[in-house]
């Protein structure tokens, strides 16, 4: 089932032949986690979605309040035949109408899709998690790179590369050859007692979980939190690497080439993250 402009429909009843999101990538989206009929980090998701729509010159309907977005997501959750512990929900917004690169209108439609998740709280997945650099394409240092749009070809081809070569994930480089993020999340690196993550100006996604982890980490005693560039050489000197996104939470990296990493700060941050969610 999907929610298309407020109506619950079977998946097959949504047509894409003239959909600008399908034809031109003229679409933006938010991926959210729903736990106990609560949208986690709703305010952060909402304001990022509104900012992205404005940047892409989409007309924001008067009805698109934060309460409306939450209501539409939960409407789809409640329509599920079988309940789950939590859900992965994608809220997609695409420009309506026809036209080619120049649209005939800036009005929008929205489509919400849903998948059940197995876990309720965030947890550290045990076992090996190996990454490699993806060098077939680079992310440009510009505003659009930090936004959640339908243009994800680097992530798609990078995922294919990782699968074909036996890696669990790949790290992306920007056009200055700095490491900026993973295929499905932001990158954090610990060197001793310093936690480093690339700034959004490097071209990485302005991630919602990135924001939560930065906030939590800055409150920890004994750690310095810095936003600065990460070079491929830094990866060899790091004590710990991990990836963040709202679905997984924190995914530790255990190996990059011959370098193996500790899993220490990731576990501490995850405990704080789950405590924050329970508190709210």
Image (spheres, rainbow, N blue to C red):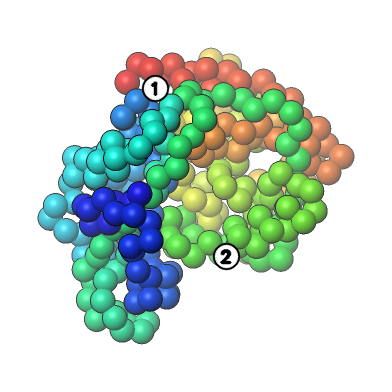
Circle 1 residues within 10 Å: few <14, some 14–19, many ≥20: few
Quarter assignment of residue 72: top left
Q: Is residue 203 above or below residue 252?
A: below
Measuring 69% from the left and 50% from the top, which residue is drawn there?
Answer: 170
Residue 274 drawn at (x, y percent): 46, 20
Residue 61 drawn at (x, y percent): 16, 58
Q: Residue furthest left?
A: 62
Horizontal side of 262 relative to 179 (left or right) equals right
Q: State the CA–CA distance, disc 1 to disc 2.
A: 33 Å
The residue that mark 2 highlights is: 153
* Secondary element at tag 1: helix
**Whether residue 176 is visible:** no
* Secondary element at tag 2: helix
- Which is more N-terminal, label 2 or label 1? 2
Residue 239 drawn at (x, y percent): 74, 29
Q: Is residue 157 above or below residue 36?
A: below
The residue that mark 1 highlights is: 277
């Amino acid at each position: 089932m999907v929610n298309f402009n407020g109506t619950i429909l079977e998946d097959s009843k949504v047509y894409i032949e003239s959909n600008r999101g399908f034809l031109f990538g003229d679409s933006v989206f938010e991926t959210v986690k729903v736990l106990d009929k609560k949208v986690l980090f709703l305010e952060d998701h909402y304001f990022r979605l509104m900012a992205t729509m404005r940047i892409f010159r989409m007309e924001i309907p008067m009805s698109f309040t934060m309460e409306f977005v939450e209501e539409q997501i939960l409407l789809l959750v409640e329509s599920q035949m079988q309940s789950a512990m939590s859900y992965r929900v994608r809220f997609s917004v695409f420009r309506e109408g026809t036209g080619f690169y120049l649209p005939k209108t800036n009005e929008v439609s929205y489509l919400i899709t849903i998948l059940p998740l197995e876990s309720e709280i965030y947890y550290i997945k045990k076992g090996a998690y190996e990454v490699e650099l993806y060098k077939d394409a680079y992310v440009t240092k510009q505003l659009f790179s930090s936004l959640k749009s339908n243009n994800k070809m680097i992530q798609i081809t990078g995922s294919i590369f990782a699968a074909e070569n036996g890696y669990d994930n790949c790290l992306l480089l920007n056009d200055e050859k700095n490491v900026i993020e993973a295929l499905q999340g932001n990158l954090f690196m610990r060197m001793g007692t310093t936690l480093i993550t690339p700034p959004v100006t490097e071209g990485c996604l302005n991630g919602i979980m990135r924001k939560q982890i930065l906030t939590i980490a800055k409150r920890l005693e004994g750690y310095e939190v810095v936003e600065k560039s990460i070079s491929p050489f830094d990866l060899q000197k790091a004590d710990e690497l991990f990836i963040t996104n709202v679905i997984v939470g924190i995914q530790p990296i255990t190996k990059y080439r011959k370098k193996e990493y500790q899993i220490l700060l990731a576990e501490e941050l995850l405990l704080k993250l789950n405590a924050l969610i329970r508190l709210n």
